[in-house]
């Protein structure tokens, strides 16, 4: 039997089958900024899918093809990575909503706000899933509730002017702003999973309820039931 015998100074069959350094897959070295962005993208996907508690540093590192110390080097741990992801998503959503409020008519402003939130949910689904989850980290870096409060502040000024023009107490504008924005946000959470009806139809129904509710607003609402306090 000849086996893997070298002939005329040639290599054995086993040697021929070994990849040479030039034939081996070369690993692309990332810059620190590129690695950071890669870890953020991977973390964002995993946090949206599994939540904060269900995601581990080991899994993030494995998906990125790096060791755990690399994650710690960039973010100090899972909590740090999560905090950056949440902050980015909160800024993105707030910018989309505030940037959309360009119309002069209050009803159109409501439409723009509703569309902005639904656009964010449709385009950045993972980000929205992260924002609406409860997490110990979210409490220290901001939460969905605090984000809704920030957006309501933008709406508050618009409602204040509208209330004043109609003879209502402008001091109640913050209450109504929270109610309106909260309604749109919670409907958005529901629509995230069902995706029916279409986005424009959802926006139309939201504005329909908001606008006609405001249109027939009582200056001094009263309770009709037995309970008064």
Image (tube, helix red, strand yellow):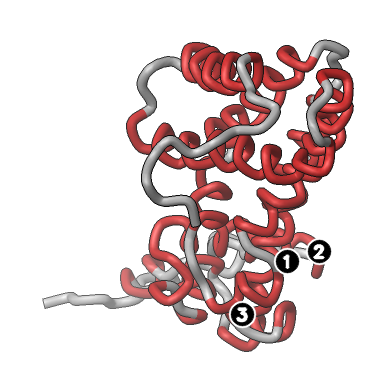
Question: Which percent across, then down, holds residue 31?
Answer: 80, 65
User: Against 105, is 61 above or below?
Assistant: below
Residue positioned 11% across, 77% down in the render: 1
**Dots 1 and 2: beta carbons under 8 Å?**
yes
Q: Point out which mark residue 79 bears.
A: 3
For label 3, count other residues whose C-alpha is less than 10 Å away and answer few (under 14), some (14-19) or many (20+).
Answer: some
Q: Point out which mark residue 33 bears.
A: 2
Front of the two marks 1 and 3: 3
Instruction: Give the spatial CA distance, label 1 vs label 3.
Output: 15 Å
User: Against 196, is 120 above or below?
Assistant: below
Question: Which percent across, then down, holds residue 211?
Answer: 62, 17
Which residue lies under the disc numbered 1? 36
Residue positioned 61% across, 70% down in the render: 138
* Residue 38 seen in render: no
Instruction: Give the spatial CA distance, label 2 vs label 3.
Output: 19 Å
* Between discs 1 and 3, the one toward the N terminus: 1
* Residue 34 seen in render: yes
Q: Point out which mark residue 192 bears.
A: none
For label 2, count other residues whose C-alpha is less than 10 Å away and answer few (under 14), some (14-19) or many (20+).
Answer: few
Judge by depth and name the residue closer to the eye, 39 or 92: 92
Instruction: Give the spatial CA distance, label 1 vs label 2.
Output: 5 Å
Question: Which percent across, then down, holds residue 77?
Answer: 63, 84
Front of the two marks 2 and 3: 3
* Between discs 2 and 3, the one toward the N terminus: 2
User: Against 140, is 122 above or below?
Assistant: above
């Amino acid at each position: 039997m000849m086996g893997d015998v070298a002939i005329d100074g040639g290599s054995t069959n086993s040697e021929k089958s070994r990849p040479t350094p030039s034939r081996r897959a070369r690993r692309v070295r990332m810059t620190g900024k590129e690695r950071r962005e890669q870890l953020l993208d991977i973390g964002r996907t995993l946090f949206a899918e599994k939540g904060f508690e269900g995601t581990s540093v080991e899994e993030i590192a494995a998906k990125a093809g790096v060791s755990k110390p690399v994650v710690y080097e960039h973010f100090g741990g899972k909590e740090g990575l999560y905090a950056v992801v949440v902050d980015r998503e909160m800024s993105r959503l707030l910018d989309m909503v505030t940037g959309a409020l360009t119309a002069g008519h209050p009803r159109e402003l409501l439409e723009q706000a509703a569309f902005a939130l639904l656009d964010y949910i449709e385009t950045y689904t993972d980000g929205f899933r992260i924002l609406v989850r409860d997490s110990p980290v979210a409490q220290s870096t901001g939460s969905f509730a605090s984000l809704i409060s920030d957006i309501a502040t933008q709406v508050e000024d618009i409602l204040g002017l509208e209330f004043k023009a109609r003879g209502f107490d402008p001091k109640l504008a913050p209450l109504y702003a929270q109610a309106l924005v909260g309604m749109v946000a919670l409907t958005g959470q529901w629509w995230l999973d069902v995706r029916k009806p279409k986005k424009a139809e959802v926006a139309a129904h939201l504005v329909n309820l908001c606008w006609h509710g405001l249109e027939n607003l009582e200056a001094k609402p009263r309770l009709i039931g037995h309970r008064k306090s």
